[in-house]
Each structure stands twice: as C-alpha cells, then as structure tokens.
Amino acid sequence: MTITYGNNGVDLPVKLAIFQTSVEDVEKGCILGNVGARMQLGRRVFYLTRFNAAFSIGKLYGLDDATAATLSAEIVGASGTGFDQDYAAGISQFSITDSTHLSSVVEDAYEGGYIFFTNGLGEGQCLAIKGNSENSGNTVIFDTFDPTSVALDADATDFRLMKNPYTKPVISDAGAEGVGWTLGVAAVSSSTGTTPTSSVDIYTWLQTWGPASVFSEDTGTEGARLVHSDGGSHDGACADDDDALDGFIGTRIAVGTSTADYTPVFLMITP
C-alpha cells in the first residue's frame, strides 16, 4: 500500500481505509490539505475526496463546473478585475481581484487547485495553487508552487481559477455537471457513516484506476471502451462509447447481467 502526502507536501499521510468515511479528523489526516492525496492498493488507485452531498458506491462523480462552484468563468484582465498589477516572469505570488468569484473566499479555499491562463500574455500556462488568503474587498492573494514562465499584464492576461477538483464533486448525470472531468468512482456509500450536507463535509476515497464494480447504463459489450453516460436515464452510470464527446473512463471487463446494474470494469481515469 502506498499513500502520498497531501497537496502541500507537509500534512500527515491519510489513515482512512478505502471503505470508510470520516468527518474532518486531524489524526486520520482527513483535512483540506490532504484532499487529493493518492493511495495505491495493488492495481487499484484511489484519491481522497471531500463531499458535501450524499454519494453512492460504484457511481461516477465529476467536477462541479455547472455553477462555477469549482471552476470559474474566464476572468478577463481589466481595470479593477484580474491581476492587480503587472508581474515579471518567475513570480509565484499574485494579488487578484474579482467580485464574481472571490467576494466570499475563505483562507486556502483554492489549496490544491489551479490557475489556467487562457488568453493574452501568459496564455498556455497552468500553475498549481499552494494556498490563498481570505478575501479583502474582493481581492485575494494566491501562492503557487510553480513560478510564471513569462510576464503577466494586468490588463491583457485572462485566466480561470479552479479549486481542488476533489473538493465537493457532483454525480455525473445526463446534464452538464460532471461531464467536463469525470474524477472517479465512489468506493463506498455515504450511508455507511455521517451524512454529508452543505455544512458537514465528509472525507472518503474515489477510485480512479484498476478493477472496479461500476454502475452501468446498459449490459454493453465485453472489452468495450467505456465513457460517462450522458444519454441515458441513470445518474452516475457508465456506458459503451457511442459519442466522442464523452469522457473516457476505462474498459468493460465483462458483459453486464442487466441494464442499470453494476459491471466489472478496469478504470483508466487517473493513474
């Protein structure tokens, strides 16, 4: 068994079994700084995830991008919005102002997340976020693990902010939620412990690689390329690939016994 450290590289390793859930617990390592920690058991790989809604074993969960809760809309650099000043190459701390996405940000809400540079000076870069300050008048200070490779212009650098993707994912359904980045399969159901709510966060594992029993929309074909099902009627299901726009999740090991049931799958999401 191999467990990596959390996102900041200093928090204690996680002491939570794959079929357990936990409220925030420092002794178990179930803390924000460890969200996204990786555990490997033989051929299977799991990532520590923090939920604030009920989850079900064997179902697919993905990035909550439908309401910009995790991934912001593009922030266009302009007077009073975006980077508060020009930055030279090699900088890893930035002051950012945005009334839409940063008005109620608490300290380290973006720990383990990313800054995607989408247009203008600096475009094409992606920096990993180490942490952030609490907002002050819609302004937040961000620290990144990586320094910028080129200079940034306060009025000509556009970007998007992402929180830790393993924080508060949503079930993959037939709509937009969870489609952009399918993260993994829940290793256990939330009914086994304290129920997560909007005010009670629960830590557990998402499986991302290796043999797994996964909820399937159909019986499918043995050896088929599997994707998140966005054309069926069952949330959190996989299906044989019939749409190149769906996210690849793995290979069907065997034909299912019935529709809307669980099937052997070899997951290939994140190794």
Image (cartoon, rainbow, N blue to C red):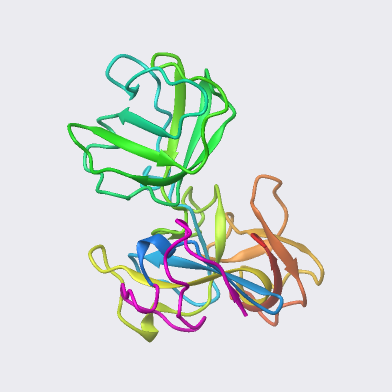
Front position in the image: 248 or 9: 9
Residue 212 location in percent, x, y? Answer: 65, 77
Q: Residue at x 27, y 18 (%)?
A: 80
Question: In the picture shown, does residue 53 fall above or below 193?
Answer: above
Quarter of the image holding residue 204?
Answer: bottom left
Question: In the picture shown, does residue 176 fall above or below 202?
Answer: above
Residue 27 belongs to the span the image colors magenta: yes
In the rendered image, which quarter contains the C terminus?
Answer: bottom right
Magenta stretch in the rendered image: 1-29
Residue 111 location in percent, x, y? Answer: 39, 51
Question: In the picture shown, does residue 212 fall above or below 230?
Answer: below
Residue 103 belongs to the span the image colors magenta: no
Q: Which residue is drawn at 22% across and 37% down?
A: 103
For the view shown, which residue lies furthest in the right direction?
223
Residue 175 location in percent, x, y? Answer: 48, 50
Question: In the picture shown, does residue 179 fall above or below 146?
Answer: below
Residue 179 location in percent, x, y? Answer: 54, 51
Q: Is residue 234 at least partly visible in the picture?
A: no
Front position in the image: 49 or 136: 136
Name the main secondary structure of what is drawn in magenta: loop
Front position in the image: 216 or 145: 145
Q: Is residue 258 at least partly visible in the picture?
A: yes
**Left of 211 or right of it: where is 137?**
left
For the view shown, which residue lies furthest in the left direction?
137
In the rendered image, which quarter contains the N terminus?
Answer: bottom right
Instruction: Please state the total of marks drawn on the protein image.
Output: 0
**Left of 223 or right of it: where is 256?**
left
Q: Residue at x 50, y 77 (%)?
A: 57
Q: Which residue is drawn at 70% across and 79% down?
A: 42
